Amino acid sequence: SKCEVKLSWNSDEVCRCDGPLIEFCRAVLYRDAERKCSRAVRAEVASLESTRHGVTMSDRSVGAAKQMDIQEEFESSFKDLCHLLQILAKTIENFSTRGLFTSAEITSMKRELLLGMGSCLARLLTEYCLYRDNVEGAHTFAYSHQDNIPAYVSALDFPSFSLQCNPADGGKQMNPLQHLRESVPASSGQNLVRMWNICSDDNDGDNLLEQFISHLEDSCLTLVGIPFSVLDKKAEKKILNARRQGLIDRLEQSSQRDEILSASVILIYQQAKNLLILGKTMTSLVMNIFEQEKKIPKRVTEVLLDLKRENDSPEMLHLAKKFGTAKNSKALAAISE
């Protein structure tokens, strides 16, 4: 007998005539959309309940959907950024142990990492706490510029953020760190303020990078309910592989000399030394020692130095891309002959 086909997203009502395409859409597409919609609805209901019980929501600049976006961004980014920060700190320690750079250059690399990645983590944690706790007046907080935190897999460097405050309703300017301490409940506000203080551009103390990582280890569980993720070999391999592929994709699509130069230097050094580098200072300093590295052919160094001297001819750009995307050191040596 002929089966009457009646499609339903609800698997409990599925007709036996549904084919593999319908099953795939139901299992993969619908369930993911259903989960996200359910979360957004729950958040909106919670907001309405808060309003009904007299909790003022009128001064919040975003609604429940924005809260969901920030929560998902936090959950997907925080762990990877913590691992990346530890890998880069390990790279700098390697440089220091091998005596490749002066103490002033090592300090400069640490400071760039702290002001960049450190402030990005401080911003990510601050945004998460503000919206998770439904902080009234969250819209008064701002950042030194409007760039988003870049995707770690293809970032050449990280922007440096500082916390700011928009003027209050009466036009009075507020101290952003004091306002943050008073706005975020319990010890969370104090922990966030300490984080911003450590990665402040005005702070010139010693061992600030180490202090920042130590503070993350001590505070992030109580701050956001997620323990600090200590780097292990599996996590390091994952980050290195993801970074390499992300940078290759960025390099292949780029036509900008500076971008091609930086991405190529980062990729070639990772290929030669299995060390991850990031940031304008670190990338520039590492390029200066390319001639000392036996696994980096002389021709590769010559081409990159030509690019650095603003020789952005199509031939040089093409060669730099070829070198940067080489599969391994053997392939790099072969294509550079």
Image: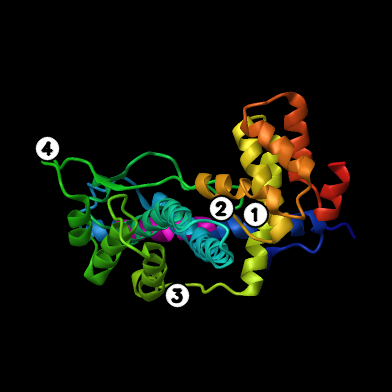
Tell me if mark 2 has few (under 14), some (14-19) or many (20+) residues whose alpha carbon lies within 10 angstroms of its own.
some
In this view, 211 is above or below 34: below
**Distance in Å between CA atoms under marks 3 and 4:** 40 Å
Residue 219 as seen in the image, left or right of residue 8: left
| Type of the residue with mark 1 | Arg
Q: Secondary structure at mark 1?
A: helix
| Type of the residue with mark 4 | Gly
Report which residue position mark 3 lands on. Answer: 227
Q: Which mark is residue 13?
A: none
Q: Which mark is residue 152?
A: 2
Report which residue position mark 4 lands on. Answer: 171
Report which residue position mark 1 lands on. Answer: 243
Q: Are marks 2 and 1 in contact (CB under 8 Å)?
A: yes
Q: Is residue 25 visible?
A: no
**Distance in Å between CA atoms under marks 4 and 1:** 45 Å
Q: Earlier in the sequence, mark 2 or mark 3?
A: 2
Front disc: 2 or 3? 2
Q: Is residue 44 highlighted in magenta?
A: yes
Q: Is residue 213 highlighted in magenta?
A: no
Dominant SS in magenta: helix
Residue 258 as seen in the image, left or right of residue 55: right
User: Residue at image x 15%, y 47%?
Assistant: 174
**Distance in Å between CA atoms under marks 3 and 1:** 24 Å
Bounds of the magenta segment: 36-47
The x, y position of residue 270, in whole percent, is 68, 56
Q: Earlier in the sequence, mark 3 or mark 4?
A: 4
**Distance in Å between CA atoms under marks 2 and 3:** 20 Å
| Type of the residue with mark 2 | Tyr
Question: 171 or 195, which lies in front?
Answer: 195
User: Residue at image x 40%, y 46%?
Assistant: 160
